[in-house]
Image (cartoon, rainbow, N blue to C red):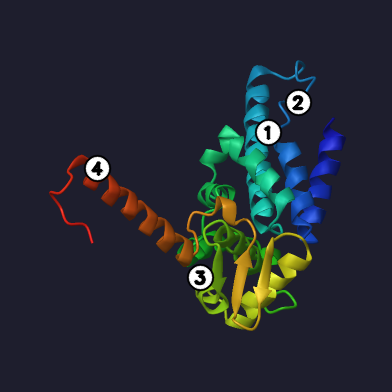
Amino acid sequence: MTQQLIKKTCYSRILDSERKFLAAAVNYMELSQINSFENLNEKSQICEFLFAFTFDQDLLQSLENAVTCAILAPAGGNRTRVLAMLYRDERARTLKNFRVLEKMHKNMLLPKKEQDAFAATLSDHHQATLAGGLTVLQKAVYEHNMLAASNIYRNIKVAELAKLLGVNETQAEDLARGMIQEGRLKATIDQVDGIIEFENAKGSILLGWDDRIQELCMALNDICDKIDFEYPGKFEIP
């Protein structure tokens, strides 16, 4: 049992160091869910207590490592499922990175202040700069915020998306294009008008401006009709 745990722990750390964050998150999560060691009967009660306490601390550390790796993993369906499993773990609420986990799980935008606070807790290899000039954390957060934006907007200008993400317009378009090509974002890019059209508009919180204006006009007409029916001739409705 102990040998297996050591091997799994080492393997998780290797995956983490190689930036295979999703696989590392799954392995760390499995480590964090081990209940207890077996065959502790030969130990004294004091040793057993101390050993169990240390073991519980190790489990929490594995859980925290799992959360960190899941946050840094590429945005997409697999990551979403892992985030959901971690969020359901009651112990996660005691972790210092729980606030970021919660926002990631709920598809909420992560502001710069919270990004910086989370960055301060990361190891050096989590802060490495990638080929495109972004750090590991920046790429993960920008991709997450891109998906969060797709749940808020039906369409958005590339310039506005860039402001939302905190990048320049070229980076915003490149991020969107890469996620679209990898099947992690359902959207199309209109390069002529500089607009990104998200395909999951059915669940959007904000509709396109034309649709919102049309719905408002229809609702206003309904109100006017009801007033005219209830109080005929008392109000002049243009």
Q: Which mark is residue 37?
A: 2
Label 1 element class: helix
**Which numbered disc covers residue 164?**
3
Q: Is there a contact, CB below 8 Å, between mark 4 and mark 3?
A: no
Please tell me in which quadrant of the rendered image residue 197 appears.
bottom right
Instruction: Work out which residue is located at the far top of the displayed protein and give it.
Output: 41
Local SS, label 2: loop
Q: How dense is the environment of label 1, judged by Cα within 10 Å: few (below 14), some, or many (20 and up)? A: some
Q: Position of residue 188 (x, y in %)?
A: 68, 69
- Indicate which disc, 4 or 3, sits on the residue closer to the N terminus: 3
Q: Is residue 63 left or right of residue 219?
A: right
Marks 3 and 1 sit apart, C-alpha to C-alpha, by 43 Å
Label 1 sits on what residue type?
Phe
Q: Which of labels 3 and 2 is toward the front? A: 3
The answer to whether mark 3 and mark 2 are in CB contact below 8 A is no
| Towards the viewer: 189 or 225 | 225
Query: The disc labelled 3 sits on which kind of residue?
Result: Leu
For the C terminus, give its image quadrant: bottom left
Q: Name the disc covering residue 229, or none.
A: 4
Q: How far apart are the alpha carbons under marks 4 and 2? A: 75 Å
At mark 4, the secondary structure is: helix
Picture residue at 56% right of the left edge, 56% below the top: 151
The residue indicated by pointer 1 is 55
Q: Mark 4 and mark 3: span between their CA atoms?
A: 46 Å
